[in-house]
Amino acid sequence: MSEKRHNIDVDFFRQLDRFTFMVRKRVSTAYAGSRRSIHNGKGLDTIGYREYNPGDELRSVDWKAYARSEKLYVRQFEEDKSLTTHILLDSSKSMDYTGADVPSKFEYATMLAAGFAYLVNKDNDKFAISTFAEEIDIKKPRRGRKYLLKTIENLETAKVGGKTAINECTIQYGKAIHSRSLVIIISDFLQDPKEIESAIFRFADHDLILIQVLDRTESSLVIHGHSRLIDLESGIKLDTYISEELKSEYKDKLTEHINHISDACSRVGAEFYTFTTDIPVFDAFFNTISRRRW
């Protein structure tokens, strides 16, 4: 496991504050915090009744009231619209990779995770950032500025290492979610596509976002000629010659892999984004927010 301290630059929080009205307007329907609204047939507390209208769900009908009056009435509830946000952050060894003059993939991913937590916290909603590799460190969702600062502090000293077991880790985490939530998975997603697909389907009933973080050298294979490639997770070394033909084949394989993930997300209504670490983190974060269907 890597013991180094991660440089998590959260200066873009100030940028979020400058754009807070624009950002919060886009997410207000999802992050409603303590605001409440009236719904029929589900919720927390019954606040009244109204006559049944064609198209209302039959399960919302109060049959006891019908027995007394022989008229159909539906219950109205006051529903809590707060939404817990679960952020799963890949801390496997492959995320420790960094190119020149850019943050590592883990540092970049952590800044994105912190940005979502910061935004959720501004609406006083609960969140948790849990790291995973071969195992998952499940954190309990909480709210508050102190919890946010403690979370960021813990991430700055988080251990990065091991292989990625996204399927097993999401099985464990799925058991910890007890209500419909916003689930954000941030990873390089350079794993078996079938395991990634299983993780996507596992959270299909939630509002799900997948964010892929890659280094530019991974996304376009900028190296050329005789090279030594090292798998960070297994330590396997490969001496090879990077030809234009090999680079083209690599790009096709990566595109196929990304399309597989994107298609799986589309089938369950999840969202999928890919960013490289040379893109300013606020631009990546704001791009995710602005494209949300909220």
Image (cartoon, helix red, strand yellow):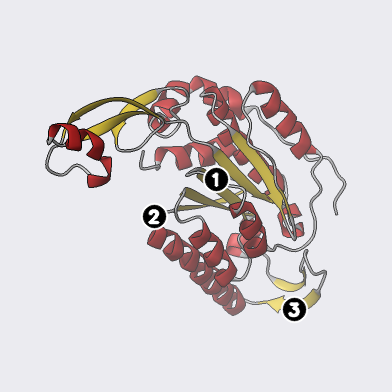
Mark number, residue 178: 1
Q: Position of residue 74 (x, y in %)?
A: 22, 35
Front residue of this view, candidates 9 and 99: 9
| Furthest residue toward front | 68
User: Helix, strand or loop at disc 3?
Assistant: strand
Read off the residue under disc 2: 269
Mark 1 → mark 3, Cα distance in angstroms: 49 Å
Residue 247 x/y as whole percent: 59, 73
Residue shown at 72%/36% (left/top)?
Answer: 8
Left or right relative to 76: residue 35: right
User: Residue 117: x, y in percent?
Assistant: 59, 33
Residue 188 seen by the camera:
no
First in sequence: mark 2 vs mark 1: 1
Which residue corresponds to mark 3? 240
Kindly identify the residue that appears in the image at 59 percent across and 35 percent down: 127
User: Callout 2 environment at 10 Å: few (<14), some (14 to 19), or many (20+)?
Assistant: some
Q: Image quadrant of residue 291?
A: top left
Q: Residue furthest right?
A: 3
Q: How many numbered circles does the render carry?
A: 3
Q: Is residue 281 above or below residue 229?
A: above
- Callout 2 secondary element: loop
Marks 2 and 1, how far apart at CA: 20 Å
Looking at the image, is mark 1 or mark 3 earlier in the sequence?
1
219 over 285 or under it: above or below? below
Which kind of residue does numbered mark 2 sit on? Gly
Judged by depth in the image, the label closer to the viewer, 2 or 1, is 1
Q: Are marks 3 and 2 in contact (CB under 8 Å)?
A: no
In the image, taking residue 248 as reference, residue 97 lies left or right, namely: right
